[in-house]
Amino acid sequence: MEVIGRGAICPLPGSPLVIGVGASRGVSVGEVLGLVEATLAEAGLSPRGVAELATVEAKTGEPGLLTAAERLGVPLCGYPAEALAAVEVPNPSAAPLTAVGTAGVAEAAALLAAGPGGELLVAKRKSTPHGRPGRATCAVARRPAAVKSGQSRQRRPAVDRLDAGQ
């Protein structure tokens, strides 16, 4: 793993992976990075393949998320709760629905950031800090490979509705 700056990972050009992250207020960078690194390792994926962290707009000011993105050397991108709510997710939850207005943050943010034709590689995982309730979730999606002229991408209905402004 190549390291630059203050412990930041140098992503590969054209990195295909996006990590959706959900977090409770005050989550530590250690908890976020621990979850992300463990999730990637268990899936056999390299941190250098990560292009961005994605979350709900309401959480883009969380120091733990901002610092995690900085250490990974990627941007932290926020999406409106309404856009996330339009994405069908395999593991909806009442907690983020109550907190930010969408039944899924990690999976929905990963899929939305991956774009049309993106694929969910790792479903939502929750952090399990030592003896405490988890305060972070993450999911991993892959952006589609470049489409050659004459090929088409399969689109998801939720993304089509967002593209159409519905």
Image (cartoon, rainbow, N blue to C red):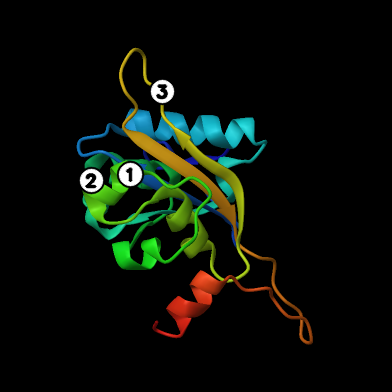
- Is residue 47 rendered to the left or right of residue 31? right
Residue 120: x, y in percent? Answer: 59, 52
Residue name at image x 46 percent, y 63 percent: 87
Look at label 1 and name its amino acid.
Ala
Which mark is in front, 2 or 3? 3
Residue carrying label 1: 94
Q: CA distance from mark 2 to mark 1?
A: 21 Å
Indicate the secondary structure of the residue bearing disc 3.
loop
Residue carrying label 3: 128
Residue 15: x, y in percent? Answer: 59, 57
Q: CA distance from mark 2 to mark 3?
A: 19 Å
- Is residue 135 rendered to the left or right of residue 139? left
Residue name at image x 49 percent, y 45 percent: 91
Look at label 3 and name its amino acid.
Thr
Asked whether 84 or 25 is in front, the reply is: 84
Q: Quadrant of the C terminus?
A: bottom left
Q: Earlier in the sequence, mark 3 or mark 1?
A: 1
Q: Quadrant of the N terminus?
A: top right
Q: Dot 1: within a 10 Å radius of its alpha carbon, few (fewer than 14), some, or many (20 or more) residues? A: few
Look at label 2 and name its amino acid.
Glu
Residue 158: x, y in percent? Answer: 50, 70
Q: Are marks 2 and 3 in contact (CB under 8 Å)?
A: no
- Is residue 67 rendered to the left or right of residue 118? left
Asked whether 141 or 77 is in front, the reply is: 141
| Mark count | 3
Residue carrying label 2: 62
